[in-house]
Amino acid sequence: MPTKCAWISRWIGTAIAYALLVQGCVSSQRVFPLAVLSDAVNPATVKINDYPEAITAIASIVTGDLGLPAPAGTATLYSNSIALETALIDEFQKDAEIAERQLDPKAREKFRAGRMERLALQARQLATTAHAVAMHQRIFINELLFVRYAWYERTRIISHEIAHVIERGLVNGRAAAPGRWLQEGFADWVAFKVQDRLGYESFSKSRENNLNAVAKAKAFQTFPSLSQLNTGDDWLLWVRTLPKADRAGPGGPPAASAAAAA
C-alpha cells in the first residue's frame, strides 16, 4: 500500500499536470475583434474561409445593410471545454456583481444564496453543449463543436451572437429583461438577413425553415407560450426539450445545436 509520502507526491504530480494542461488550453485560444477590418469589403463577393473574413463580412452587413450599431468587443475560440468553462465562470461572476448592485438589500441576500453553485453549473452546461455564448462585448466560441460545420453554418451562428452583443451594447452591458423570446427572435432575424446577403440562403427560405421547425415541435408536445419564454433559464429548458429540425444545408441549426446568449 502506498505510503503517505507516495500519496502526496502522486497528488502533487497530478496537480502540476492539470495546471500545465489548463495553461496549454489557455495559450491556444484565438481572439478576433468584432469589427469591419476593411472599408472596401463587399460581403456579396467574399468567399469566407476563416474567422476574420466571416466577422468582417457580418459586421459590414449589420452596420451597412441593417443600419445597426457596430459591434464592440472580441470573439474568442476555445479549443476545449475546460478553458471555455473557466472563462464563462469569470464572465458570469462579473455579470452577477453588476446585477447584485441593482438589487435592494433583501433581494441581494437571496440572490447571493447558492450563486457560485448556480454559475458553475451554468458554465459547465454551456461549455459542453453550446456552440457559442454571447455576453457584453464578448463571444465565446466552442471550437470543438464549430469545426464540424461548413462556413455557411458558422456565419449563421456568429451573426446570431453578434446580434446579442449589439443588444447588450445598447444598454451598456446592464441587465435588461425585454423577454428572451424577443432577444432570440431579433438575433435570428439578423442571422437570416446576413445569410441572405452572403448568398447562402434567402431570408424567406430561412423564415420558412424556422416556421417548419416550430410546426414540427408543436406536433410532438404542447408548445410554450411567450410568457414561458421570458427568462434565460426558461428559454434553455424549452430549447433542450423541444425537438429540432435536422437540416444538412443552410438555413438553421443542425440537430441539438443551441447557441446561447447570457
Image (cartoon, helix red, strand yellow):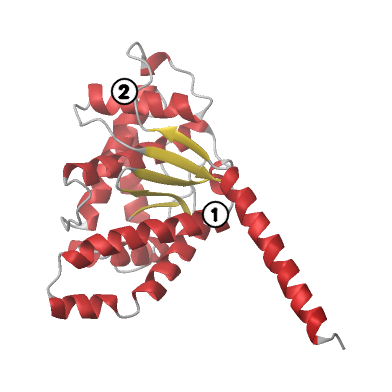
Q: Report how far apart the C-alphas of labels 1 and 2 lie in the structure.
A: 30 Å
**Residue 10: x and y, percent?**
78, 74
**Residue 219: x and y, percent?**
35, 62
For the residue marked with disc 2, what is the amino acid? Ser
Could you say which is closer to the camera, residue 105 or residue 172?
105
Vertical placement of 226 versus 4: above or below? Answer: above
Q: Earlier in the sequence, mark 1 or mark 2?
A: 2
**Outermost residue, right direction?**
1
The quarter in which the C terminus is drawn is bottom left
**Residue 122 visible to the viewer:** yes
For mark 2, does the 10 Å Cα neighbourhood hold few (<14), some (14 to 19), or many (20 or more) residues?
many
Could you say which is closer to the camera, residue 217 or residue 181?
181
**Residue 144: x and y, percent?**
58, 47
The nearer-to-camera label among 1 and 2 is 1
Vertical placement of 9 versus 261: above or below? Answer: below
For disc 1, the marked residue is 83
For mark 1, does the 10 Å Cα neighbourhood hold few (<14), some (14 to 19), or many (20 or more) residues?
many
Q: Residue at x 78, y 74 (%)?
A: 9
The secondary element bearing badge 2 is classed as: helix
Which image quarter: residue 123? bottom left
Could you say which is closer to the camera, residue 23 or residue 238?
23
**Residue 249 visible to the viewer:** no
Q: Residue at x 49, y 19 (%)?
A: 47
Which image quarter: residue 60? top left
For disc 2, the marked residue is 60
Q: Residue at x 20, y 75 (%)?
A: 108
Vertical placement of 130 versus 162: above or below? Answer: below
